[in-house]
Structure formats: C-alpha cells, structure tokens
Image (cartoon, rainbow, N blue to C red):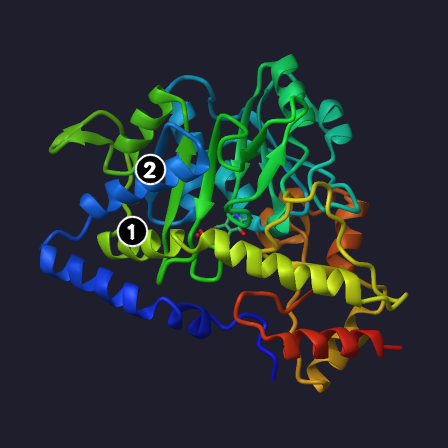
C-alpha cells in the first residue's frame, strides 16, 4: 500500500530531536505558555516576516480569535459580513459564524481553486468588513488583487494559512513574501497532518498589528494579561509547552519538507499525462507548498476505486461543499456551481517527504494506465 501520508515515517526522522525537546519540557516543570511557547512565537514570526506570533490551541481557534479580537477592538460587530471562499475547509467558515458574523461565500477560480477576485467586489455590501482568504491545498491566493479591493472598500484581510506554511508570494513590486504577512492577520494550524505539524493540536496567529496582537494575547488566556485581572470575556486557547517544543524542532526542517514535496509535485506534473486527469495549476514558481496534490477528473468514483485496487491510498478534499452541509442549512439553497463541480471532481494523491521515488513512479504509471 502506498500511504497517503505516513506521519510516523515523517516524525521518525526527527525522533531524536523531538525526544530531547520533550525531555527538556518535562524537566522544566512548566507546561503551558512558557519559554518554549515564547521562543516558538519568536521563531515563527521571524519565519513569517511578521512582528508577532501568538500560539493558540488549534487552527480553528486561531481564526476565531482574530475575528473575536477585531470585535473587541470595535472594528467588527455581530451581524457584519466576511467574504470567504465557497470551497474551503469548513473551519474557515465556522470561524466567522462562531463569532456571530455572516459568512458571504464567493466562488473560487476553477484552475487555482483559490478565491476568484472577480467575484469579490459584487459580493461587497455596506456590512462587509473583511475578506478571509484561504491558501487552499498550499497555494497562495492572488493577494495583490485581494489587497487592492480591501484597500478600496476599507476591509481587513485575514489569511487562512492552515495548508500553506512557508508558501511564497511575489507581489506586483516584485517583493517575495511569505504567507502569514500578506494581510492584516493570519491563522495557522499545526494539526499533525499539516506541512508543519505538531504531535497533537496546535495553532498560531501571525500579525504585525500591535493592538490586535495584544488583544489576542489576552483573549486566548481568559481575557487576561495579568493573572486574575480580566479585560475581556476570553477563552482558554493556549499552546502547550510540549507542542511548542515539537514545533520548534519541526520548524527547522519546514523548508526541507517543502523542497521534498515540490520534488514529488514536479515528478507528478512532468510524468502524468492521462487525458482523463487534469493536473493542478501553479500560478507562481514558489507559490505552492503542496500540502495536497489535487487532480480533477470526471470519473472520480471509478478513479478512486482503481487507485484502491492498485494499493494507492487517495482522499477527497472535500466531498461536500460547505453550503451543502447540514450545519449550514441557511446556505443549502444557494448555488455555487464552480465550487460544486470542484467538490465532485477532486481527488488527492499521495504527497509528502516520506514517499519514495519508486512509489512516485508507481503512482504516475498507475494514473497513466487509467482508462
Ligand atoms: C486544518 C484547517 C483548519 C483548522 O485547523 P485545526 O487545527 O484542525 O483546527 C482551518 N482551515 C483550513 C483550510 C484547514 O485546512
């Protein structure tokens, strides 16, 4: 069987460093929001080219807390609208509705799977306060267009970077920047299967906005900067020392992980030529960190079974669009034909630093023999 993603093999490579880091935390006697968290926050903000990073419990909380902080700061209020892609993982949308704001779904571009700037302006109303863009599958959204629309309508730009740690964007001034610093604030997930994965749940927010960072620092810890002094009705969404220590080890190897994933993607892009399969499109050379390698086909069910029969694990990201979910009954009657088509056609094939050349070749050959 060729695994979709073998986390055990990936983490085995760093096992010595991970175990050492783990012992360091055990011996420290301090387990929540301590030195490991603040060092990781420094290292990750440095990596993302932002002033601040705030560790939180998971990626969904990262997004929720950005919006919540804007509410506390009086920038957003309940009932306001946030534009979000119609084909994202449900977490991006949950972060908006959880705060009592309204998600306004906008269709993606059929080729990049990312928010299509053309759809944004028509969706803007007087209640629109932000664009929450998702760098889906690991590819950066066209941020120049999004930022210029945001500027025109005075909107905040929030990046969902859960799938795109380390992805690079070349802006119109030819500056190369990392995701996480391309808008006003960004949410990251370090769920174990992400490109930068902890050994449990973890997440972070990056921003260069001092006021926002201070507000989130309090909100994640019961709304408190100082013990037993509560400024806000906050939540408990703190990052553990153990997870921060694991992430500090893995952050050192993130660029290597990305290079390895790119090599797999390049092999697939060069090797797969079956006319029944459409390959993913890459907008800029380093804009994709290949969290997922997603192909499309009109014959998904058949291809999925064929891959299983040939002992290749594949997954679907995602089978049901958010607006067709039970959870969002209020959206069930909307039509998002591009998003629906994507959800019917996508299939993700194995990609990671743990896959061998022999396995890559077998995936390519198997896909080319599909009829
Ligand atoms: C994984 C993911 C999240 C949520 O992260 P968790 O850490 O699982 O809460 C949010 N958005 C996207 C696009 C994701 O892929």
> Residue shown at 84%/79% (left/top)?
369
Residue appearing at x 31%, y 58% in the figure: 246
Image x and y of residue 64, in percent:
43, 38
CA neighbours of label 2 inside 10 A, class few (<14), some (14 to 19), many (20+)? many
Question: Residue drawn at (23%, 48%), measured in percent from left and top?
Answer: 36
Q: Of helix, strand and loop, which one carries label 1?
A: helix
Compared to residue 369, the image places residue 5 above or below, namely above
Circle number at residue 54: 2
Gap between marks 1 and 2 measured at Cα: 11 Å
Q: Which residue occupies the foreground of this view, 304 or 219?
A: 304
- Marking on residue 310: none
Q: Where residue 24 sits: x, y (%)?
A: 16, 59
Q: Which residue is mark 1?
A: 244
- Vertical arrangement, residue 212 with respect to residue 308, above or below: above
Q: Residue at x 72, y 85 (%)?
A: 310
Please give left or right for residue 261 compared with residue 345 in the image: left
The quadrant of the rendering that contains the C terminus is: bottom right
Quadrant of res 45: top left
Tag 1: Cα neighbours inside 10 Å, few (<14), some, or many (≥20)? many
Q: Horizontal and vertical percent for residue 1?
A: 60, 84
Please tell me whether mark 2 sits on a helix, a strand or a loop: strand
> Of callouts 1 and 2, which one flags the residue occurring earlier in the amino acid sequence?
2
């Amino acid at each position: 069987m060729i695994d979709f993603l073998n986390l055990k093999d990936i983490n085995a490579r760093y096992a010595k460093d991970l175990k050492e880091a783990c012992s360091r935390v055990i011996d420290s006697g301090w387990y929540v929001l301590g030195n490991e968290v603040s060092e990781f926050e420094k290292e990750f903000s440095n990596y993302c080219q932002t002033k601040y990073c705030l560790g939180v419990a998971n990626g969904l909380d990262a997004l929720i807390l950005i919006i919540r902080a804007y509410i506390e700061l009086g920038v957003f209020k309940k009932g306001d609208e946030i534009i979000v892609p119609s084909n994202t993982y449900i977490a991006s949308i949950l972060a908006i509705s959880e705060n009592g704001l309204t998600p306004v779904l906008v269709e993606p571009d059929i080729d990049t799977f990312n928010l299509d700037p053309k759809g944004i302006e028509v969706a803007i109303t007087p209640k629109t306060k932000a664009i929450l863009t998702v760098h889906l599958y690991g590819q950066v959204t066209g941020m120049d267009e999004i930022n210029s629309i945001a500027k025109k309508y005075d909107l905040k730009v929030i990046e969902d970077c859960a799938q795109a740690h380390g992805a690079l964007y070349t802006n119109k001034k030819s500056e190369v920047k990392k995701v996480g610093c391309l808008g006003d604030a960004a949410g990251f997930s370090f769920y174990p299967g992400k490109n930068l994965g902890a050994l449990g749940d973890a997440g972070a927010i990056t921003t260069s906005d001092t006021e926002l960072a201070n507000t989130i620092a309090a909100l994640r810890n019961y709304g408190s900067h100082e013990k037993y002094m509560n400024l806000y009705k906050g939540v408990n969404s703190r990052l553990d020392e153990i997870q921060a220590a694991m992430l500090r080890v893995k952050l050192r190897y993130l660029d290597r992980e990305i290079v390895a994933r790119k090599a797999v993607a390049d092999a697939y892009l060069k090797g797969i030529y079956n006319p029944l399969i459409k390959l993913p499109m890459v907008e800029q050379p380093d804009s994709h960190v290949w969290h997922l390698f997603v192909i499309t086909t009109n014959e998904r069910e058949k291809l999925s079974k064929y891959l299983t029969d040939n002992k290749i694990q594949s997954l679907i990201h995602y089978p049901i669009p958010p607006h067709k979910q039970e959870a969002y009954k209020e959206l069930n009657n909307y039509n998002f034909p591009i998003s629906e088509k994507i959800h019917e056609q996508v299939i993700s094939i194995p990609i990671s630093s743990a896959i061998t050349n022999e396995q890559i070749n077998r995936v390519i050959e198997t896909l080319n023999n599909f009829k």
